Image (cartoon, rainbow, N blue to C red):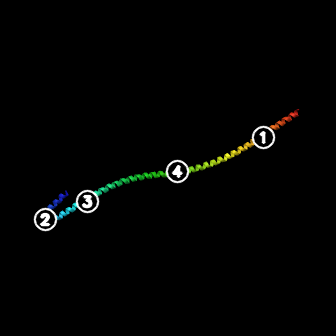
Amino acid sequence: MKKMRMMSCIVAFSLVFGLAGCNNAEVKSLQEELAKTIKEKESIEAKMHVVTQARDELQGQVKELIESRDQLQTKVAELDSMQKRVDTDAKTIAELKGQIEKLTQSRDVAAAEAQAAQVQINDLAKKLEAETEKVRVLQEQLKQVQAAIAELQNSIKL
């Protein structure tokens, strides 16, 4: 369409100049300049086509980069969420370690108290054995005394 207009302009200018009394040399010069201008226009259009293709490619790359950015933002949000969970888990672990430490200390104290109680039980058992032995000895002595009393009573009665 544009070429058609250009050719129409060339023909129109040729007629105008031809009718206006321009000589052949001037018309020829104008035709050469017009041909040169047409070549420059075609060269510019070719360059514009290349630039348009490059622009389209760049727009495609921009679209891909935007998609990649969106995916990365989604992944970053997921990683932030995971980091928060990791931080929460780390805090929970630290609290549990503190509780374990307290329970371990309580266990150690209870074990020491149990050991002390066992020692005390053993001491009391030994004392009970000793006292039981004393009671047995006293019972034997009591039996002997009772036997002696019974013998004395029998000898008094006779």
> Counting residues from the N terminus, which is met first, the one under dot 1 or under dot 3?
3
Question: At label 1, which amino acid type do we have?
Answer: Val
SS under mark 4: helix
Circle on res. 137:
1
Label 2: which residue?
A: 17
**Given contact means CB atoms under 8 Å apart, are the residues at marks 1 and 3 in contact?**
no
In the image, which is nearer the foreground, mark 1 or mark 2? 1
**Left or right position of 83 against 146:** left
Label 3: which residue?
A: 48
Q: Label 2, label 4: how many angstroms apart (C-alpha)?
A: 97 Å
Q: Label 1, label 2: how many angstroms apart (C-alpha)?
A: 161 Å
Q: Label 2, label 3: how many angstroms apart (C-alpha)?
A: 33 Å
Label 4: which residue?
A: 93
Relative to 142, residue 60 above or below: below
Question: At label 2, which amino acid type do we have?
Answer: Phe
> Counting residues from the N terminus, which is met first, the one under dot 2 or under dot 3?
2
Quadrant hosting residue 63: bottom left
Q: Position of residue 117 (x, y in %)?
A: 67, 46
**Given contact means CB atoms under 8 Å apart, are the residues at marks 2 and 4 in contact?**
no
Q: Residue at x 16, y 59 (%)?
A: 7
In the image, which is nearer the foreground, mark 1 or mark 4? 1
Relative to 83, residue 125 above or below: above
